[in-house]
């Protein structure tokens, strides 16, 4: 059986995951990528999405990431994310409230004070978080 790799997902404020993984899948800015033990080293930016990994016991785990960077080495994957939440830690009510706020901002097309790029980014984050949290 192949060796596991060390996975670390950190944000500016906390360590979200420090775990052994059999495989790590992440949302690279150029497409999803997977890393197994012995992978060729590389670094890439991440887009908003879900990091999936299989822990050492074989259980699938999911973590929402709000962009950032990933470094893959033969024995470890380090993800530096702007923000990140384990699936089980996502507050669905808070995510739905964020979704509603973003939708209202985007509907206010005539308001010159609305930053539409920020509102679109907030909408995308909220959609991903809700989808991940409600996934069975």
Image (cartoon, rainbow, N blue to C red):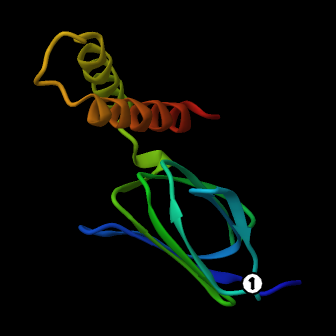
Is 84 positioned to the left or the right of 41 in the image? Answer: left
Residue 87 in view here: yes
Residue at 66% over, 86% down: 41
Is 101 positioned to the left or the right of 121 in the image? Answer: left
Is 38 positioned to the left or the right of 44 in the image? Answer: right
Residue at 34% over, 60% down: 82
* Quadrant position of residue 97: top left
Residue at 13% over, 20% down: 112
- Image quadrant holding the N terminus, namely bottom right
Instruction: Determine the residue located farthest toward the right in the rendered image.
Output: 1
Q: What is the crowding at mark 1: few (fewer than 14 residues within 10 Å), some, or many (at least 20)? A: some
Q: Position of residue 28 (x, y in %)?
A: 59, 59
- Closer-to-camera residue (19/106): 106
Q: Position of residue 99 (x, y in %)?
A: 34, 24
- Closer-to-camera residue (123/63): 123
Q: Where is residue 4 in the image (x, y as percent from the top left)?
A: 72, 83
Residue 94 in view here: no
Q: Is residue 22 above or below residue 112?
A: below
Q: In this view, does 105 lie above or below 9?
A: above
Q: Mark 1 points at which residue?
A: 39
- Image quadrant holding the C terminus, namely top right
What kind of element bears circle 1?
A: loop
Q: Where is residue 35 in the image (x, y as percent from the top left)?
A: 72, 73
Question: Total of numbered circles in the picture?
Answer: 1
* Quadrant position of residue 34: bottom right
Is 126 positioned to the left or the right of 114 in the image? Answer: right
Residue at 21% over, 31% down: 115
């Amino acid at each position: 059986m192949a060796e596991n790799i060390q996975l670390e997902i950190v944000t500016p404020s906390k360590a979200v995951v420090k775990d052994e993984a059999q495989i790590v899948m992440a949302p690279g800015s150029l497409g999803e990528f997977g890393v197994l033990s012995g992978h060729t080293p590389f670094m890439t930016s991440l887009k908003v999405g879900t990091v999936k990994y299989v822990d050492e016991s074989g259980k699938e785990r999911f973590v929402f990431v709000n962009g950032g960077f990933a470094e893959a080495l033969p024995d470890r994957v380090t993800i530096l994310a702007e923000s990140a939440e384990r699936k089980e830690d996502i507050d669905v009510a808070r995510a739905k409230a964020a979704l509603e706020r973003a939708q209202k901002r985007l509907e206010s097309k005539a308001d010159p004070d609305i930053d539409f790029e920020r509102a679109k980014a907030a909408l995308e984050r909220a959609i991903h978080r809700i989808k991940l949290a409600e996934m069975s």
